[in-house]
Amino acid sequence: MSTQVPALLDGLVDDAAVFPPGSASLPDAVDAHRRHRAAWYADLVGPLLVPASAVLDGKLRDLVDPGSAVGLIGDTGIAGLPAAMSMLAEDRITVRQVEVAVAKRGEDPQPGLTELLKRAEAWRGVDVYAEIPLTFGLMGALDALAEARADGAPVAAKFRTGGLAAELFPTPPELAAVICACGERDLPFKLTAGLHHAVRHFDPETAFLHHGFVNVLAAALAATEGAGVQPVADLLTATDPRPLLQRVEGRLATPRPLWVGFGSCSIVEPLTDLARLGLLNGGDEA
């Protein structure tokens, strides 16, 4: 196996070990993240994602080395982010990205998004991801993000693709419409939850159909090439990896467009799936 991660997979998987369903303790997550950063697959792994509540409680201070980079997840809401950002700065911990929900399902996302964009003006050099529900007001929120990004703000979208309830799993056509909408606006996006394996699959324990992250990768590539919602949905629906690999393998040497990546409570699971599909073996050509 190559010890080089292809450019297409660079930073694909953020380390969300402390979040469900893995729910590792913060000390264990920090120790494991150090090992990931020292491993041959380090380029696959994004920052350790930490909840703002853990920062505000002081639980992170003695665990993370000064100069380390983390992603801050706003589990305390938008209002709790400035204090968490200040504490991390005092501890000389670099915040690479901030991710927070701007509304609950069924709520208008515009007020929360407006507040987030205003606060983000003070966070220079930090990528900000607004989690937008795939319901009321979605397209208007994407327009607002695209406009802010065009004005130079380092902002993008984030969507939920799983959870503990069936309504948190968008259908392939629903997710395809969102991916295409982001492609039309040249708006990067992240995903969270439910992406436990490379290819779309049924979980017999929960009876949920989970999206596959290689499905999403193929779909994002198709959307950037101008594919419409139906062809993109077809890629998201596929349970056979072969059509996905046909689209992905020829792009391994190029940076990943549109889709920033996703957080996973396990790094080993996506790493193993990618190796089984042979997508990491292309690293020598990348």
Image (tube, grey):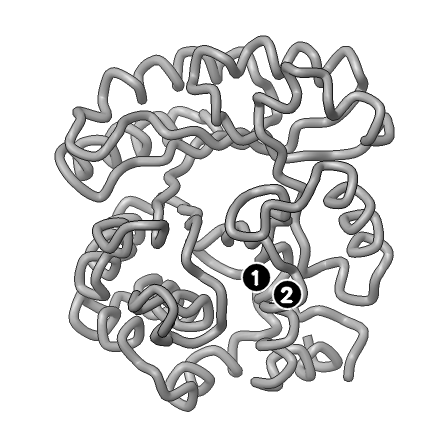
**Does residue 260 appear to the left or right of 173 in the view shown?**
right
Q: Residues within 10 Å of mark 1 (few under 14, many from 20)?
A: few
Q: Residues within 10 Å of mark 2 (few under 14, many from 20)?
A: many
Quadrant where the image shows the C terminus: bottom right
Residue that label 1 marks: 255
**Does residue 193 appear to the left or right of 34 in the view shown?**
left
Front residue of this view, candidates 252 and 164:
164
Residue that label 2 marks: 7
The image position of residue 154, as x and y in percent, is 49, 30
Report which quarter residue 96 is drawn in: top right
Pointer 2 and pointer 1: residues touching (CB < 8 Å)? yes
Residue type for callout 2: Ala
How many numbered discs, if any? 2
The image position of residue 95, as x and y in percent, is 66, 27
Task: Answer above or below: position of 260 versus 115.
Answer: below
Q: Earlier in the sequence, mark 2 or mark 1?
A: 2
> Disc 2 on helix, strand or loop?
helix
Residue at 65%, 60% (x, y): give it: 267
Residue at 21%, 51% (x, y): give it: 167
Residue at 35%, 62% (x, y): give it: 224
Residue at 49%, 51% (x, y): give it: 260
Report which quarter residue 5 is drawn in: bottom right
Q: CA distance from mark 2 to mark 1?
A: 5 Å
